[in-house]
Amino acid sequence: MKLKWLWIVLLVLMIMVVCGLIVSALGIGIYSFTGISSVTNSDVSIVEQMFGGEGLRNPNISAETSEDKTFLVGREEITLVVENRFGDVVVSGKDTDEIFMSVVKTAWGITNEDATENLELLQYEVIESPGTLTIRVLEPSRTLNMPGSMDFKLDIPISTNVTINTQNGDLSASNVKGNVDLDTSFGNIEVRDLQEGEIKAKTQNGTITLRGINIQGFPIEASSAFGDINIYQADANGLDLSITNGSMSLENIMISGEVELSNDFGNIGYRSGQATNLRINSTNGTITLNGVIVENLLIAHTDFGNLDLSKTLASEYDLLTKNGRIDLDGADQASIKAETDFGEIQMKNLVLAIVDLKTKNGTVQINGSLAQADHHILSDFGSITIRMPANQSIGCDLKTNFGSINSAFDLTLSGAIDEKHFVGKINDGGGLLTIETQNGNITLEKTTQVEEK
């Protein structure tokens, strides 16, 4: 037992000796690098002396210069290419036969002299070839602590194709008749008053805004990884938009061809417009359509979110949400397929519609007239209510396992009488309306004269 305590005491003493050596070493090091040292006699901090001092200082002093250049290009259609690294690019179409360019360079340093020296490292080249003018920012000859920037502002002939890319900066093009292709890694994109030519806009992190686009014979394509897409007043023959994370807002969008809208995380809103076919997909977000006319097929799918369609007409609807409500206000002689796993389905102002509706958990409400065709309405857990005109003619197959069946119409029944299962017809019949709920009531109501008007 005595030996055991002796070993413990020796171990504690050894630990104390090691700690003392460490403290001594640190004290010698600190003394060597402090401003008290008679050798350095400096007020510079220990860390700055150990790791280079000025190298760790934040380059917060800027130097700036600007320059202007003019290029005579004539009035023939040309292509302008701008390849920037860090900085904004703004392009505006003018009634001119030349390109006027204004460049602002900004560099940073830890001193005025350092910033001025870094400013000299910011260079670009201009390459003139038949039909093309290329402006390319060059890689600095050495690495800078903080990259400088070059902002370009260009007035160009209206009939110009524009291709611009930058790693970090905002891009803008306006009042041109030509193709516009804008690409930035971090920055916003704006296109205004484009009169001809296709549009391509892409940003990894930023907002895309298009306004006043009149390119009836050309398509629009835009994508943003993290940022919103907003389009106001556009006329084109195709529209393809995609977002990874952000919201999408469209207003007064007239498309003579296909429209495809995709959003992984965010809402999609489309107000007033038209399309031949409209396909919308959202992984997580609400889809809202108001006043949109679709010539053929309208597809709107979301995994988590509501579908809200008002005054939106199509020949065929394909509506799906895994978790959310489905609301449709207004459909004229259309085929409607709607399905939700968890949510209600409500449809009103239907005119001679064909419906195929399904919800696993939620109620179904329909108000309007049905075509003399086959219809299917299913709910696992929820009641089903249908309001139809008094002169509606349709065959019926109504079934509930746990609930009741109630009808304001006189049903002509066929087969065996079963209070949980009615088979028959309303008025003259025609087609077959199949309604089934596992747990809920089935109710057939008549619309009022006011509703029918």
Image (tube, grey):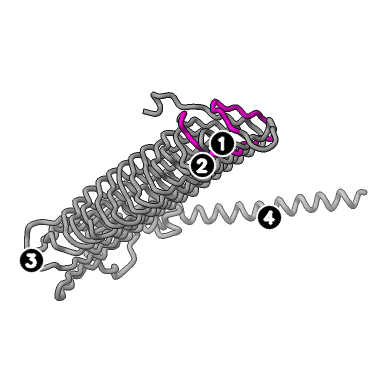
Dot 2 amino acid type: Gly
Instruction: Say which residue label 1 marks.
Output: 425
Magenta span covers which residues? 390-412
Residue drawn at 25 percent across, 46 percent down: 233
Chain-order first, disc 2 or disc 3: 3
Chain-order first, disc 4 or disc 2: 4
Instruction: Using the rendered view, name the quadrant where residue 26 is placed.
Output: bottom right
Foreground label between 4 and 2: 2
Instruction: Say which residue label 3 marks.
Output: 75
Foreground label between 4 and 1: 1
Decide: few, some or many residues near mark 2? Use Cα within 10 Å; few <14, some 14-19, many ≥20: some
Cα distance between the residues tagged 4 and 2: 98 Å
Instruction: Say which residue label 4 marks.
Output: 18
Decide: few, some or many residues near mark 1? Use Cα within 10 Å; few <14, some 14-19, many ≥20: many
Dot 1 amino acid type: Lys
Q: Is residue 3 magenta?
A: no
Cβ atoms under marks 4 and 2 closer than 8 Å: no
- For residue 430, the mark is 2
As helix, strand or loop, the secondary structure at mark 2 comes to loop
Q: Position of residue 325 (x, y in %)?
A: 51, 37
Foreground label between 2 and 3: 2
Q: Position of residue 378 (x, y in %)?
A: 59, 41
Front one among 190 and 267: 267
